[in-house]
Image (cartoon, rainbow, N blue to C red):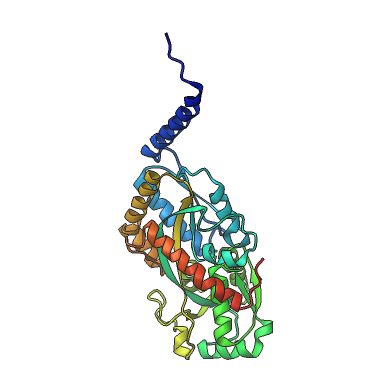
């Protein structure tokens, strides 16, 4: 005689079965390809960094990792896509400072950068530099600064949208030099770099991972590292502080996130994978070649990325608003 469950218990059993199925999925995670979303255009500094980690995750997890670049609106298009993705660990977001600045830059952000994501851990940190088209008329850093101060309204400055790393760097440069340039937004500094190489735009303040090869190849030129110290990859390039410019020191860190609600066993697997990636000699060597550092295993953890994001939200949102940047 088959036992029929009291009606009241059926939903309870159904949800228990769903949890068990989901946790079973979590237990053999990953059993199919993953997607790493980089919310800026292909060819930019974020894209090259993401592809290094996608390759490492693929080797470590034994599953294909596809990088996708749903770019636009300062990284909010791609970030929104991950926020709405199924929380199963197969759709991840690799993003940097704009995850924090977008809180201040968009009144109607279609997601909450903190509440709608599970941090997995930080991945990299890296410096920025001031680059120009090869025909830009200044022979060195002192002349560059003088030329900007004398010709600012005629000079165009590319960036990847309000709150992006290149935008922040450009704002800081304009602020410390006391100039206002003609800002041109792009969907990423990959496309911006193409226009810099083509001479369609004058300047770009960008991460080394997007610019060092083009500088070494003579396709663009650089005037300064955007900080207090020179870059090992470009030892001849002065730091902007050498021109007596203080208060301009920017470093960009990328971190990995999953959608809110991703089961903890899956987050643990992804965090363990990230920890292996940041200590992987091949990953470290490839990043160092672009002037970028893999973070320590202490930073490649959820609580470290959560704290880093909170600090960037607190510090950078106010900086942008004080700089007069109007939220969208
Ligand atoms: C990119 O990958 O295009 C950059 O990270 C965008 C930016 O400047 O933040």
Q: Quadrant of the N terminus?
A: top left
Q: Where is residue 20 in the image (x, y as percent from the top left)?
A: 41, 33
Camera-nearest residue between 11 and 27 = 11
Q: In which quarter of the image is the C terminus?
A: bottom right
Horizontal relation, residue 47 to residue 55: left or right: right
- Confirm whether residue 206 shows in the render: no
* Residue most extreme to the right: 154
Q: Which residue is drawn at 37% across and 54% down?
A: 274
Camera-nearest residue between 203 and 28 = 28
Looking at the picture, does residue 313 appear above or below residue 247? above
* Residue most extreme to the top: 1
Q: Ligand 1 appears in which quadrant?
A: bottom right
Horizontal relation, residue 288 to residue 105: left or right: left
Total numbered labels: 0
Q: Position of residue 300 (x, y in %)?
A: 36, 59
Looking at the picture, does residue 167 appear above or below residue 59? below
Q: Where is residue 55 in the image (x, y as percent from the top left)?
A: 41, 51
Q: Where is residue 227 in the image (x, y as percent from the top left)?
A: 45, 80
Horizontal relation, residue 159 to residue 62: left or right: right
Camera-nearest residue between 204 and 61 = 61
Q: Residue at x 64, y 91 (%)?
A: 150
Hey, which quadrant is residue 324 in on the image? bottom right
- Confirm whether residue 141 shows in the render: yes
């Amino acid at each position: 005689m088959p036992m029929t469950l009291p009606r009241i218990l059926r939903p309870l059993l159904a949800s228990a079965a769903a949890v068990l199925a989901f946790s079973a999925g979590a237990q053999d995670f990953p059993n199919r390809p993953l997607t790493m979303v980089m919310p800026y255009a292909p060819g930019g500094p974020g894209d090259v960094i993401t592809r290094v980690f996608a390759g490492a995750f693929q080797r470590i997890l034994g599953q294909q990792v596809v990088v996708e670049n749903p770019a636009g609106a300062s990284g909010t298009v791609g970030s929104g896509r991950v926020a709405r993705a199924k929380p199963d660990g197969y759709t991840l977001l690799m993003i940097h400072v704009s995850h924090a600045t977008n809180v201040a830059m968009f009144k109607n952000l279609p997601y909450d950068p903190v509440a709608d994501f599970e941090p997995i851990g930080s991945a990299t940190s890296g410096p920025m530099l001031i680059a120009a088209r090869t025909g830009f008329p200044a022979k060195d850093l002192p002349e560059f600064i003088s030329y900007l101060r004398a010709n600012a309204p005629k000079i165009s400055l590319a960036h990847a949208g309000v709150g992006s790393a290149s935008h922040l760097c450009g704002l800081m440069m304009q602020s410390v030099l006391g100039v206002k340039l003609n800002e041109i937004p792009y969907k990423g500094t990959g496309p911006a770099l193409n226009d810099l190489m083509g001479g369609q735009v004058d300047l770009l303040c960008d991460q080394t991972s997007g610019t060092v090869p083009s500088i070494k190849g003579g396709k663009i030129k650089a005037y300064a590292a955007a900080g207090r110290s020179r870059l090992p990859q470009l030892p001849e390039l002065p730091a902007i502080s050498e021109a007596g410019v203080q208060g301009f020191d920017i470093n960009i860190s990328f971190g990995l996130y999953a959608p809110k609600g991703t089961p903890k066993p899956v987050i643990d697997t992804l965090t363990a994978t990230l920890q292996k990636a940041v200590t992987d000699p091949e990953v470290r060597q490839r990043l160092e070649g672009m002037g970028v550092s893999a973070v320590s295993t202490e930073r490649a953890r959820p609580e470290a990325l959560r704290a880093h994001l909170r600090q960037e939200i607190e510090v950078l949102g106010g900086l942008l608003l004080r700089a007069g940047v109007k939220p969208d």
